[in-house]
Amino acid sequence: MSKQSFLCVGGAALAGAAFLMLAGIPYGVSSPSNVRNIVLSPLFWPYVLAGILAFGGAGLVLTAFRLPPGARDERLSDVPGGWARLGAIAVIMLAYVMTISTLGMVWTSIVAIVAVAFLMQAKRPLLTAVVAVAAPLLLYAFFAHVAGVGVPQGELVRLP
Amino acid sequence: MKFGLKAALAALAISASATAAMADYPERPITMIIPYGPGGATDISARTIAEALGEAVGSPVIMVNRAGAGGATGSVAVQNAKPDGYTMLFARVGSHTVNPAMKATLPYTLADFRFVGVYEINPVACAVKADSDIKTIDDLIAKVKAGGVSYSSSGVGSLLHIAAAYVLKEFGIADPVKDAIHIPLKGGGAAATAVLNDTATFICTNSSALASFVANKQLKPLLVTTAEPIVGFDAPTSADLGKPALTQLVGWTGIAGPDDLPDDIAAKWGAWMKTATDDADFRQKMESRGSVIRLMQPAESQAFIEGQYAVFRKLVDDLGMRIEN
Amino acid sequence: MSLMDSFAAGLALVWSLESLLALVGGVLVGVIAGAIPGMSATMAVALTLPFTFAMTPITGILLLVGVYKGGIFGGSIPAILIKTPGTPASSATVLDGYPMAEKGQAGRALGMALWASCTADLISNLALILFAGWLASFALSFGPPEFFTLILFSLTIIAGVSGDSLLKGLISAIMGLLLATVGLDLVYGTNRFNFNDPNLMGGLNFIAVLIGLFAIPEILTMVWNPKGQEGQARGLGGGWVTWLDYRRCFKTIVRGSLIGVVLGSIPGIGAAPAAFLSYSEARRKSKNRDNFGKGEIEGVAASESGNNGVAGATLIPLLALGVPGDVITAIIIGAFMVHGLQPGPMMFVANADIIYGLFLGLIISSIALFFIGTVAIRGFRFVADIPKALLFPVVLVLCVYGVFAVNNNIFDIGVMFAMGWVGFMMLRFGVPAAPFLIAFILGPLLEDNFRQSMLMSGGSPEILFRGPITWFFWGLTVLTVVAIARAGLRVRSKLLEEKRT
């Protein structure tokens, strides 16, 4: 229960609600011109939600001001190298999703396991390598041949 | 693992020369996209023909469900696929006639697909709750004119949505959109239940979806749109009622590829579907569920679907049902 | 035919090697499929369907029912071991099951999940056999207005899973409700927050959101601070659920089962809301209320009894009315039809032997689930012993395969990753994830039923107060909200008192 987290969440909720009401709903939701009743309009529910979001955000900000300054929130404190590692996994995830259809899910998964295990500072490199190769292949065998899922194969090497 | 270096090399070689060998089609499994979820009418129909097709094709057929947005999500996947015949689509009345007729914002049109065959026709029936005081279609029409009648559907742009409006229009209701209330539900099962629990007055849908309710005397059929009677449905046909235009109101399932699918692949599909639909086992399974097996060759399919589209499009424009944004 | 004759005819059908094998095999397949994230019970049943075409009707249907029951329980295994619910129904199990695994009590949690599941399953089956007709007519009195009030009441669960701050829980829930509006409008078919992208038109994939919200933040936390996660006692710890645990949770299990039976018999709700409702009721009534969400065994018992209580009960509308309660029973109806059987009131007369055979088979399936589940838990024992730095990368890949398999769409993997980052930020700022998920499940039901009611009544709100069922749920909702407000005031006055002293 830290002041900081209440302020941040409350502020974000207020900003989100303002965005929705001013831009998000008018541009993101289309409504036909012949709506008979206002409560049936596709816009009605999103506006109600945005209103409650604003209410909740305001409530959090108010609560935050009444809270004592208090100790630092442990969840919000930094860890050495943490942000760099998070950046790295963001890149891995992005690359993973982007390359699945061209390279094939099995091959990208092998690379992903190795990369993520490295980020998590896994202890045994040999075991990691074995698992990195075996797990995606086993999953492929199961999903493609038992469950009948069309696992993306990519354009380079096709598995039977 | 059955995976060897040899296989990998062979696969590599094959994929490198894929463009050269159209005559060898299919040399790897064909992916067939079902644009609706598992367990639905399209899914069961598709998986039933897949068994028979697999034998005809001679290589495995992978069935893939990609549901969402009334069939649009899966259809777009095939629209954008390579026209190599390895990605095909199960097209359905909802995704390829009603939806294109109703939705201006749909990311595809009929012209984006090449139909290689329609294999199944589903007659449509309209029904009310068994203990309802509506006994005939004329009773229903009288009630609509009095006001307060509603009908259930499995969503905007479904066959059920347009079928009810079409039937009302045929029987002389000038503006069914205003005079009867459309209550959309999530899925065909929920739509039938809505009539059972008095949420909606009537429903028009594939006879197969109503068969068990009619047999159990929970629902009472008012009409069937075919010219011939349907087994188990004690209701007047479109011929009995003197409304031949109603026969155009049917559901169907077919197979399509992207629009630039080559002729020889389309021809191969025509032959495979002939073999599959001649399969006695397949026919028996499909007919026991109330669908009519009728194979149309590629050219005939294309004409049939375009004809249906034109009928629905005219209705949608006449009634102002088109969704512009 | 008297009741005894019917049962005898049913027994003759079930008591064959073929039928028993189908049941046991079905449960086994279901448990394995349920334990793989993304391979939901629905998919497993759909994949099994073609095999039943060649069997006799009763064998085929028992196989499907076995897969269904096994699948619902199987989902709890990854929920407890790797914080990845195998099926949506087991997402409530994560709340206490995973903290228990973190404390080295995975074996105890899994054991309780199994025992609660089997008990609930049995109660659910008995309810089906004894009260099918009565519950079915009750279910038919549920139209959109009744649904709306029921869902509104269910949303009060959010207060119970909000953790420290009710307001943060509220914001989390609103985010879930907002995310659920993505897609096509129900009544008009227009675009809502989908920017005309076909991938968004169908709405966000439920499993992708679910896994993204629970499993991926764990992985990101591990990447954020690899050292901080080490040295925790994991492993099954040799622990197993005790008779004492079971007796302590028995009331909770029975309550959860009954909630499951009632919600299961109403078409269109499903197992996930039942699990959450059972969880929130258990928390409200429990002496250990403060321990919920931190690894309370009663929480696992509540959620697993809630979702398994649904399994037998969904067959009530199927058999008594011919109405599918969810996608799985829709597939099972398909299996009936293939064999020329038409579920509904007439079937009790025309095919009484099959109905009673099915009843007996269901009872046997509860017993089969108990033994197969025990073996399966021992089989998955090793997962808890794998070091996290090796386990988590594999979990990531498993989630990718699983989420892809649901709808065969790579876009969904992107949704899962994006939700993972949302979940991670929520974790950092102390915003609970459970309200988000409950709201994401219930939000569309709430809005759709509200608008269907308005369509029925032509815009008059009076319809929301028709009949005793709506009044009942309005009453419950008001009572719960008052109770929440009073509890909130009590906490505040306590805080003020502390300040003064």
Image (spheres, rainbow, N blue to C red):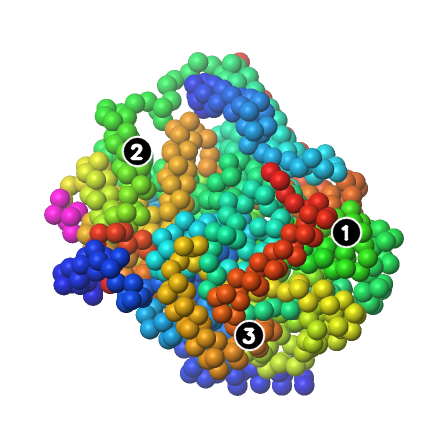
Percent from the top left, x then y, of residue C433?
46, 37
Look at discs 2 and 3 and give the one toward the viewer.
Answer: 3
Residue B176: which disc?
1
Helix, strand or loop for disc 3: strand
Of residues C36 and A157, the one nearer the viewer is A157
Residue C370: which disc?
none
Residue B293: which disc?
3
Taking C140 as reference, is C205 above or below it?
above
Which amino acid type is marked by label 1? Pro
The subunit letter for the residue under badge 2 reads: A
Residue at mark 2 = A90
Helix, strand or loop for disc 1: helix
The subunit letter for the residue under badge 3 reads: B
Measure the C-alpha gap from mark 1 to mark 3.
32 Å
> Can residue A151 be seen?
yes
Q: Quadrant of residue C222?
A: top left
The subunit letter for the residue under badge 1 reads: B
Q: Residues within 10 Å of mark 3 (few under 14, many from 20)?
A: many
Which amino acid type is marked by label 2? Ala
Which amino acid type is marked by label 3? Ile
Q: Main secondary structure of the magenta part?
A: helix
Q: Which residues are magenta?
A: A125-130
Look at discs 1 and 2 and give the one toward the viewer.
Answer: 1
Of residues B63 and B171, the one nearer the viewer is B171
Of residues B119 and B234, the one nearer the viewer is B119
Q: Is C477 displayed left or right of A121 in the figure?
A: right
